[in-house]
Amino acid sequence: MIGWLRTASFRTLLLSALGVVALSLAAVAGANVVTASAPPTSSLKAQIKGVKNAPQAAGFVGRVQFQNSLIGSLPMGASADPVLQGGSGRLWVDQNGQIRAELQSEGGGGDAQILINKDGLQIWHAAQNTLYVLPLGKEKAQKKAPQKIRKGQRGQGWINELKKDWNLSAPQPGVLANRPVYTVRAEPKTRMGQIGALAVTWDATYKLPLAVQLWAKDTADPVLSLSATEASYQEPDPGVFQLSVPQDAKRIVWKGQKNKRPAKNMKKVDLSRASLWAGKPLPSSLDGQSFSSAVKGKNTLLVAYGKDLNGVMIIVSPVEKASGNQSMQDLMQTVDLGSVQGKGMFTPLGGMLSWTQNNKVYSLVASKSQSEITDLARTASGL
């Protein structure tokens, strides 16, 4: 898993994340489109209570708009990409949990297609002529076979837990994709990395999500947004849940850890042992946060400071095992760390900065601003 995260292209990582976001629309399902008006004012408690009695629909067929401003611009010569720069397309969902999404970029950089079903996740990237496959093991497939979404289970309890850490707005009535909707905005009560706010918009009748938006700290516009622009609640044609991929397409399959007990390959170590393997003293605290844990695999060491999104992680690998994907390298910028030069990739939600010392590659990952990450890397590399 660690190796895949380190070597996967940024497009692959973002496509996988988009697949996860699309799962939130899996329950959307049935009625003919009508001219909509905003629903009446309602409370969050009333909306949660209404989930239990909301009508069950047959499926979802519609269009979506994906906006992404995490990456300001692509490297010179790169074609437009619907994942890195946003795009629009179609979405189909059936009652069994199958999802098919297509995104086309406005700049003609090729489309991206996502298919999620009981067998796992498939991502087709036309510009790269590559099919990425993440299979679901047979044992997991048997335990997690697609099921109809059971709505309203422990909804109020989940909201109460959410309110401990987030300030929730009252549901705001509106219209989206010609459907009456409510939108709730959530803002963290205390700092949660670079997350500024999260908004979810759901259908007032079916109580199912039609949009998700994410803001970074101190940003007026969302950095990530996935929203429906057309919504028809009907059963999709079963034929849409198959990808048509060229025979000459490159196929990349991530089979996961062959060992049925992968935890045995990662061993907990204390700070002194972690420092010994890293080839230099590791700090006992970083950014005012104490060392919390360290785990070591065959060729990778992960050292964590603090907890949750406010924490900092340092990943250490031998130089010969840390070769990165070229497409990710193209998105990174050179950063002067004083004693060494680093390569960093920064987004409004956080970033990663890597440098080489003692024949090891150190990568500092945190949900912090570029200046904060750079200062932390200077501290860590200067020890």
Image: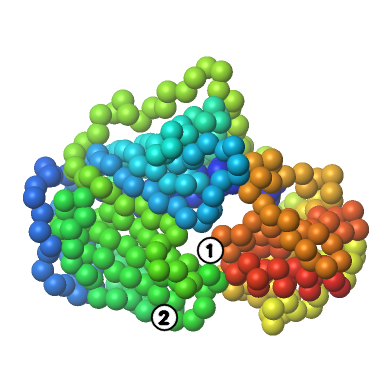
Image coordinates for residue 360, horizontal then vertical, percent = 85, 55
Q: Is residue 277 visible?
A: no
Q: Nearer the viewer, residue 204 or 87?
A: 87
The local secondary structure at tag 1 comes to loop
Q: Amino acid at mark 2?
A: Lys
Image quarter of residue 380: bottom right
Q: Residue at position x 78%, y 70% from top?
A: 378
Image coordinates for residue 237, horizontal then vertical, percent = 25, 29
Position above or below: 337 against 298:
below
Mark 2 vs mark 1: in front? 1
Q: Nearer the viewer, residue 188 or 295?
A: 188
Image quarter of residue 116: top left
Image quarter of residue 162: bottom left
Report the disc number at residue 164: 2
Q: Residues within 10 Å of mark 2 (few under 14, many from 20)?
A: few
Q: Amino acid at mark 1?
A: Pro
Image coordinates for residue 296, horizontal then vertical, percent = 78, 58
Q: Residue at position x 41%, y 80% from top?
A: 164
Residue at label 1? Answer: 348
Q: Residue at position x 25%, y 34% from top?
A: 236
Report the disc number at residue 180: none
Position above or below: 343 against 235:
below
Image quarter (top left, top right, bottom left or bottom right) of the C terminus: bottom right
Q: Nearer the viewer, residue 202 or 330?
A: 330
Direction front: furthest residue: 76
> Is the image coloured rainbow, by chain, by secondary structure, or in one colour?
rainbow
